[in-house]
Image (spheres, rainbow, N blue to C red):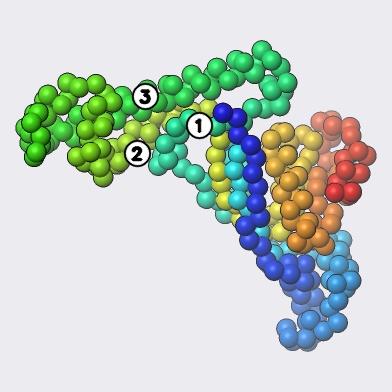
Amino acid sequence: MEATLKLKLLAYTPNADAVVAKGGKLCYYPGGIEALEEGLTEEKIGRFVSMLAEMQHESPLEHAVFTFGIEGVSRSLTHQLVRHRLASYSQKSQRYVREGSFEYVIPQDIKNNYKAKKIFIEAMENAQTAYDNMTEELLVEKIKAFYACKNERIAGEEESIEEVLKRSNKEIIQHCRIHFRKECSSLEKLAIENARAVLPNACETKIIVTMNARILLHFFEKRCCNRAQEEIRNLGIEMLKLVKTVAPNIFKYAGPACTYESCPEGNMTCGEMKEVRERFKSM
């Protein structure tokens, strides 16, 4: 089934604009920390944050931190996301969480092409079948090895171990879950950590991300650009909209690099700098 992006700002530094302004002001202020707030109106906070941006004095931005909960994105996206190294990530594990009926993200170009979309969905269904079958085969193999170390007969059972292992795969797995619940769970994790190798990049995942404002601005510069892959670009834009509601001064000029300077992409430019600037300045 197709996944849908869900994004939530889980936590953030209260009064982030003011915190950054105080951090920047302290660097040039002869007085004490308690006096930093004197006369620090909303207007002055805005001016001070803008001044820091103009001076490219970025270290005070690191005092403001933002945590996002992200669902309905592909593994392909998170492979790109975690390349922004100066951040913290907690992602749903495919080693410990079984991907039963996994959701997937369909790239827009594929979605717009009827035949391509049909091929894509068939590939997802085939991957699910391969994953399920491989998990079952690997799990049964491990259960058989586990049972080989047991007595000939399990207490309370009329059938011998040898007779149990003649059953179907599903019956063997069910037998193990009933009599050795904890051990069966551990064996299943060993099976799915290998079966996950057949899962596609499009497989849906969930991740919690924490970044400070300095790293976020760099993230927006790179990932809100038209040359970024569409899925992560759409995520970046939605993240930017969220942080602008709680820290409007910090992220006043946030967006791709061409929002505030000439396009750095050279011959690879999208050629839409004017439109991009207008879009992000009005956001």
- Dot 3 or dot 1: first in sequence order is 1
User: Could you give the CA–CA distance between mark 3 and mark 1, rounded to whole angstroms?
Assistant: 15 Å
Query: Where is mark 3, residue-wise?
Result: 134
Query: Where is mark 1, residue-wise?
Result: 102
**Nearer to us in this view, 49 or 176:** 176
User: Could you give the CA–CA distance between mark 2 and mark 1, rounded to whole angstroms?
Assistant: 17 Å
Considering the numbered disc 1 on the image, is that residue within a helix, a strand or a loop?
Answer: loop
- Dot 2 or dot 1: first in sequence order is 1
User: Which quarter of the figure has residue 16?
Assistant: bottom right
The amino acid on which the numbered mark 3 sits, given as a three-letter code, is: Met
Provide residue 40's location: percent of width, then percent of height.
Answer: 84, 78
Q: Residues within 10 Å of mark 2 (few under 14, many from 20)?
A: some
Query: Where is mark 2, residue-wise?
Result: 189
User: Which quarter of the figure has residue 267?
Assistant: top right
User: Which quarter of the figure has residue 187?
Assistant: top left
Question: Is the residue 187 above or below the residue 106 in the image?
Answer: below
- Specify the farthest residue to the top: 115
User: Could you give the CA–CA distance between mark 2 and mark 3, rounded to whole angstroms?
Assistant: 13 Å
Viewport quadrant of the N terminus? top right
**Nearer to us in this view, 128 or 229:** 128
Question: Is the residue 221 above or below the residue 12 in the image?
Answer: above
The residue drawn where x is 71% and y is 49% is 239
Considering the numbered disc 2 on the image, is that residue within a helix, a strand or a loop?
Answer: helix
The amino acid on which the numbered mark 2 sits, given as a three-letter code, is: Lys
